[in-house]
Amino acid sequence: MIHAETSRRRFLKSAAAIGIAAPFAATAVRLDAKEEPLFKISLAQWSLHRALRAGKMDNLDFAKVTKREFGIEAVEYVNQFFKDKAKDEKYLGEMKQRAADEGVKSLLIMIDGEGQLGAPEDAARTKAVENHYRWVEAAKFLGCHAIRVNAASKGSYDEQMKLAADGLRRVSEFAADFGLSVIVENHGGLSSNGKWLAATIKSVDLKNCGTLPDFGNFHDYDRYQGVTETMPYAKAVSAKSHDFDDQGNETHTDYKKMMKIVLDAGYHGYVGIEYEGSKAPEPEGIMLTKKLLERVRQELAQG
């Protein structure tokens, strides 16, 4: 048995060693915390829609431009810019390889122009649902985690909720087999009503069906309320931007207030830059949005 005095000396020696090491350990913890940001930043392809539509930029170069010009390492595609390539594995393979070569992560594909998932007519709704299947497969091939869809419908408030939920449920059931999520953006009509969209997603009642809250698409509806209502189901977030003041703040959205809502909901994933302004050229608007998000992130991290 070790003598009591010997044990006491060993204890004091160990305590002293711990006391010396503690500040260094605390510093290490703080450094680790800095390496993991409150949220990450991605780039939505729509931010460059003018350049893409004018032929000044090719869809295949999106990942390269994102990384080299803007220093962003995650992208959100828009199907409009490769609309006829959903089943073209050679083309998709080239997209995938180019993103990999740049160290860029493919997050999702935003889907438009494939019919109303909440169409009142059964045949039209079924066709829209099935039109989305190929994009689920394309997103899986590219390594994405989701497709963004719209919840367009017609009819009364409750009728549209029922119809949209049916279409969303069917696409989500298909996507579940691929390990993908189906996320709805507030994108016009009743989907730009936060209460309606949240209730619609809740009625779908599938874990892989969620939302993509967009800061700027709550028309005639308080944007802060709308984001608050849809964040519980969020699997992505869109930082919409249009115009900036001399201090670099977005003039339509209080980004610090909005990002606090996002973080308070427990979301720490990617926030996609979606510059849609016309006063600043697209590259400048993207960088202004990025700098604003980085500044807000730092301010919120400091408390």
Image (cartoon, grey):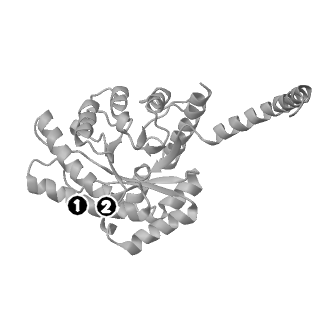
Q: Quadrant of residue 140?
A: bottom left
Asked if 167 appears above or below 255 in the picture, the reply is below
Asked if 284 appears above or below 113 in the picture, the reply is above
Q: Using the image as rendered, state which of residue 249 and residue 265 is in the foreground.
A: 265
Q: Using the image as rendered, state which of residue 45 and residue 280 is in the foreground.
A: 45
- For the point 41% across and 59% down, which residue is it? 52
Q: How many marks?
A: 2
Image coordinates for residue 275, horizontal then vertical, percent:
44, 44
User: Is 209 on the left or on the right of 249, as rendered?
Assistant: left
Amino acid type for the residue under numbered disc 2? Trp
Question: How far apart, in angstroms, are the residues tagged by discs 1 and 2?
Answer: 8 Å
User: Is 132 on the left or on the right of 50, as rendered?
Assistant: left
User: Is 56 on the left or on the right of 156, as rendered?
Assistant: right
Q: Using the image as rendered, state which of residue 288 and residue 156 is in the foreground.
A: 156
Asked if 42 appears above or below 79 in the picture, the reply is above
Q: Residue furthest bottom?
A: 90
- What label sits on residue 131 in the rendered view? 1
User: Is 250 on the left or on the right of 156, as rendered?
Assistant: right
Which element type, helix, strand or loop, lies under badge 2? helix
The answer to whether residue 216 of the structure is visible from this angle is no
Number of residues whose C-alpha sits closer than 10 Å to that of mark 1, classed few (under 14), some (14–19) or many (20 or more): some
Image coordinates for residue 26, horizontal then vertical, percent:
73, 32
Q: Residue furthest front?
A: 1
Number of residues whose C-alpha sits closer than 10 Å to that of mark 2, classed few (under 14), some (14–19) or many (20 or more): many
Amino acid type for the residue under numbered disc 1? Asn
Is the C-beta separation of discs 1 and 2 under 8 Å? yes
The answer to whether residue 243 of the structure is visible from this angle is yes
- For the point 30% across and 67% down, which residue is it? 84
Which element type, helix, strand or loop, lies under badge 1? helix
Image coordinates for residue 100, horizontal then vertical, percent:
53, 64
- For the point 37% across and 60% down, which residue is it? 139
Q: State the residue position of label 2.
A: 135
